[in-house]
Image (cartoon, helix red, strand yellow):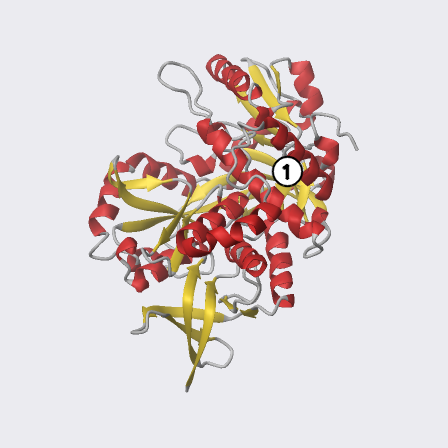
Amino acid sequence: MSRQTKTDVVLIGAGTMSATLGSLLKELAPDWEIKVFEKLENAGEESSNEWNNAGTGHSALCELNYTPQRPDGSIDISKAVKVNEQFQLSRQFWSYLVKSNLISNPHDFIMPIPHMSLVEGEENVAFLKKRFEALSNNPLFQGMEFSDDPEQLKEWIPLIMEGRTLNEPIAATKIDTGTDVNFGALTRMLFDHLKSKNVEVHYRHCVKDIKRTSDGLWEVKVYNMDSGQTEFHAAKFVFIGGGGGSLPLLQKTGIPESKHIGGFPVSGLFLVCNNPEVAEKHHAKVYGKAKVGAPPMSVPHLDSRYIDNKKTLLFGPFAGFSPKFLKTGSNLDLIGSVKPNNVITMLAAGVKEMSLTKYLIQQVMLSNEQRMEELREFIPSAKNEDWDVVTAGQRVQVIKDTEAGKGTLQFGTEVVSSSDGSIAALLGASPGASTAVHVMLEVLEKCFPEHMKEWESKIKEMIPSYGVSLVENPDLFQEILTSTSETLGLSENLPFQTVS
């Protein structure tokens, strides 16, 4: 027996993206009926879970791959500026939710933490200095410091400098406005808030198919894992926010926009410090440079994290390969995603990305001791018994045909929507959750253009810099940074004194 219902909006997947879109829609269109389907037992269990991502609160303060060097030696900061502006939108929306008492206790999901970049070798030090000069002139990166003095670095990163043999130049940048974000905790808070607003959240409900009906609605076929029954839910708008699981569902819709897109799964491991005394000696997120041939999401970093209100220390990620699209997925996911319309795209990527394939194979083959050796490049005094291995989340990088040619591997997040805006899917990986608000505003603009005019004033109330460039309005940026820092309990990290 199956049952059928009708609703305004269906959100597939109970992660950060669906939580954000649902929360935005509940403010903009409180009367709309929203249903959420999640195959796991709780919200934020897959890509959004705190153990499955770096929680860096990506604002491009420390990620060197966001500031590539141009052939003429100058530094291109355009991506760093873009990612930083996008993260500011998230901060503003979270502040609005806290101020409106829709969520509480911001320290349960966001904490202040310095963001640092660390390099060794003459060439890398010269690059970091240039990067520092290019960024520190920009209002979004004010307060950034640079040092190549080992004594100064001992103060900033004592654990990393302890027992280090300085055979070559070493340098770091540090900025105190960085954050550590527990996206798992935030996602669970947002779903608690949505449930209090009468959003129906169905756990252990697995979406099996999505079809267009003759009256233009989308029919979502859902398997109830507890009752064993199949249900059909028709909706005017469907959002597929199932992390790596989004691609197979997008393919089922049959929309033209879903063709010629593939996915390449990359898994990850972190080393987690189990010795509180060691974790206490480090207080920063320190990003290094990716190895040659390594994908951008595998930049090595040593992170202070706050998980369950407890400080911990993570190092990684070590990339790995699994054909699953989700941690809880199937080994047939990758093969199943190859269709007649994307097989050429996928094969072209395979030929192009030989260095990535080779890198992943090398990473999979690493022994525990070899992982510890990589950690010792960061912490020379690291002891094996102080560190455990944790499997991080699965990431599925988008593969598509672009101007750069067939089968180009995309790094970042991407919204794919139908031409009429009735269905949208989110694909891709980092900076992902950090830019969730920006990405979901893009979904609203693409899918509800007819409502944007009436919604604009409410959006600006929630996100004051919506539609405005912060880099061109430094006073507004300073005002927003100050107010969001106060609301979210991050004020002590500001590079300027706030006037109350």
- Residue 192: image x %, image y %? 64, 63
At horizontal 62% and vertical 66% (from top left) the residue drawn is: 197
Where disc 1 sits, the SS reads strand
Q: Position of residue 372 (x, y in %)?
A: 55, 35
- Badge 1 density bin: few <14, some 14–19, many ≥20, Cα 10 Å: many
The quarter of the rendered structure image containing the N terminus is bottom left
- Give the answer, above or below, for where 182 lies relative to 86: below
Pick the residue in front: 470 or 440. Answer: 470
Q: Is residue 186 above or below residue 376?
A: below
Looking at the image, which is closer to me, 73 or 18?
18
Where residue 257 appears, as percent x and y from the top left, is 29, 53
Q: Which amino acid lies under the numbered mark 1 shown in the image of this protein?
A: Thr
Q: To which residue does mark 1 refer?
A: 179
Residue at figure coordinates x 38%, y 60% from the top left: 423
Question: Residue 476, located in which quarter of the rendered image?
Answer: top right
The answer to whether residue 51 is visible is: no
